[in-house]
Amino acid sequence: MRRKKLMQIGVGIALIAAFPFAAPVACTTPDRATNVLNAQGYTEVQITGYAYFDCGQGDVFATAFEAKAPSGQRVEGAVCSGLLKGNTVRLD
């Protein structure tokens, strides 16, 4: 019985330890971000992963990107979105 309890605790600790690494992958929407950026005139879009500190408190998805802006400049930023709201493009 004690061994089973220790195994459960160990699995719980492992899941908690893995969360910061696994959650960002689940909280990006690469296809949606690419579509939003293309619709706004950005080209050469490259998704670079999760945007840790670029989005607001109500945003669930934070997808980092690099792209060529409509003005021709290279830019970096994030496409932020929530469950019941639209998308926001934020530039660094």
Image: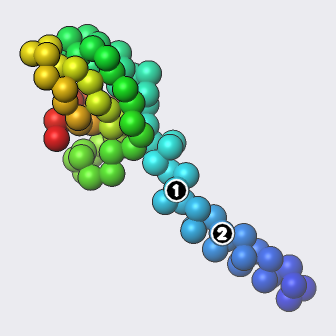
Residue 17 in the image, given as x and y percentages of width and height? 57, 68
Q: Quadrant of the C terminus?
A: top left
> What type is the residue that disc 2 sits on?
Ala
SS under mark 2: helix
Q: Which residue is labeled 2 in the image?
A: 14
How many C-alpha atoms fall within 10 Å of the one at disc 2: few (<14), some, or many (≥20)?
few
How many C-alpha atoms fall within 10 Å of the one at disc 1: few (<14), some, or many (≥20)?
few
Residue 85 visible here: no
**In the image, what residue occupies the spot 52% across and 56% down?**
21
Colour convention: rainbow
In the displayed structure image, the side of residue 33 where residue 69 appears, left or right: left
Residue 83 in the image, given as x and y percentages of width and height? 37, 35
**In the image, what residue occupies the spot 9% across and 15% down?**
71
Is label 2 or label 1 in front? Answer: 1
**Could you say which quadrant of the image residue 69 lies in?**
top left
**In the image, what residue occupies the spot 43% across and 31% down?**
29
Q: Residue at the far left: name it.
A: 71
Q: Earlier in the sequence, mark 2 or mark 1?
A: 2
Q: Taking 70 as reference, is 73 above or below it?
A: below
Q: Which residue is labeled 1 in the image?
A: 21
**In the image, what residue occupies the spot 46% across and 48% down?**
24
Residue 82 in the image, given as x and y percentages of width and height? 32, 36
Q: Taking 47 as reference, is 32 above or below it?
A: above
